[in-house]
Amino acid sequence: MNTTKKTNNSVNKVFKFGGASAASIERIQKLPGILRSYSEDNILVVISAMGKTTNALEKVVEAFYGGHREEALQLFQQVKDSHLTTAKYLLVSNYLAAEAQLKDFFTEVEWLLHDKPVRDYDYYYDQVVCVGELLSTSIISAYLAESGIDNQWVDVRDIFRTDDNFRDAAIDWAFTQSRVQTEVLPLFNETRLVITQGFIGSTSENESTTLGREGSDYTAAVFANMLDAESQTIWKDVEGVMNADPKEFPDAQLIGELGYDEVIEMAYYGAQVIHPKTIKPLQNKGIPLYVKCFLNPALPGTVINSHTAKGLPPIIVLKQGQVLVHLHSKDFSFVGEKGTAALYQLFEELRIKPNLMQSGAVSLQVCLDDRADKIEKLALTAADLFDVQLEKGLTLLTIRHYNAEVLERLTAGKTAVLRQQTPETVQVLMR
Ligand code: ASP
Ligand code: MG
């Protein structure tokens, strides 16, 4: 038999637990069981902020930046209370140590909230919002230790170096890679579990940064890449990747295996699956991504890898709140040249991503998300070249790997205002 011996300080797996898996005491209590069932592995564990904590912290920043200090402090008090309550419930022997750690993070934020804002909104956002993951990981690390699961807690801001593009910071790949080698890998000589945060990092000036909402999947993928992990697993409160949103389609089915490319396509059309940024670091090293359900780890879940999965079911994405912009050339000049070029430039300036576009001899039709501010600017500027008409309240249906039956069923009783079709994908904008 071919046995390959693991060296101590190599990492086999990267796990990411999302906010939903830390949303309640009962859910956090599932983590020890899951981690125990992987007792043969060295695992780097990335954990998000608990439940809706990130949203709650966003409210704190809004109040602070709006000049409402008392309200900001009050809102932050609620975040403090809920974390202290969770810690008290989960911890006995480790409670005091964990409380001291939490209080250090509280103090950092409160100092900042007592000043007047003098820098950019985005700067304050990152200094406050990063605390969510620091609090959740501190509590969970202490709880795992108390449950007999030895682990090391790491402040990922000491590892992930970023630029200072607050709220959408870019990782300094080379610096971070060297910190992973010198600071993270050696920890696995002492323990088989390292617990750290997703979504956050730090500049060379030691200012906290965030990588963009839903950034924890991406953090985990960067770790998996840099550690040459054999796999990454994202633990969610759903069975795996489904072919449609089960809230809208009760007969949605699980997809067992998917290619990296398919996930990127699905995300492009608006499916809320996995953040598309997550795929590249994994794809580059051919690391498979498992999506599993922490409520029932025995379920098979989904694996995302480099194979091109065959026989996929129709994958359905519904986007509500769409606007159709009709642009009609004013002087009947040919739309295809000047008009389209000017329009694309406008998209770039306004950071608009058209969801669907169709051009005719003297007119163009563009389907966009209804972002009132952007649509207004677009309509105003385009009015120089075109007569502009808007139609709001539309739904965009996208079906990949469609067939006649499913298309018929999902468009029955609706009026199609725009439609585009390739052998793989059909899109219908419906009224
Ligand atoms: N806590 C952050 C958010 O809610 C990051 C994440 O969960 O991925 O966006
Ligand atoms: Mg999340």
Image (cartoon, rainbow, N blue to C red):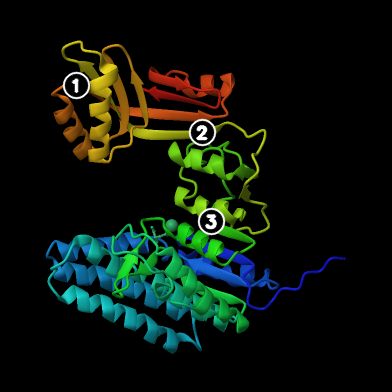
Kind of residue sitting beneath label 3:
Lys
Q: Which residue is drawn at 45% across and 73% down?
A: 137
Which image quadrant is residue 36 in?
bottom right
Q: Position of residue 194 (x, y in %)?
A: 54, 75
- Give the structural element (helix, strand or loop) at label 3: strand
**Earlier along the polypeptide chain: callout 1 or callout 3?**
3
Marks 3 and 2, how far apart at CA? 20 Å
Q: Where is residue 328 in the image (x, y as percent from the top left)?
A: 22, 16
Beta carbon at label 1 within 8 Å of ligand 1? no
Q: Which residue is drawn at 44% across and 18% down?
A: 413
Dividing the image into four quarters, tell me where ligand 2 lies.
Answer: bottom left
**Earlier along the polypeptide chain: callout 3 or callout 2?**
3
Q: Which numbered tag is attached to residue 388? A: 1
Kind of residue sitting beneath label 2:
Ile
Kind of residue sitting beneath label 1:
Val
Foreground pick, 176 / 20: 176
Say whether residue 148 is visible: no
Q: In this view, does 214 lie to the left or right of 300?
A: left
Q: Which numbered tag is attached to residue 236? A: 3
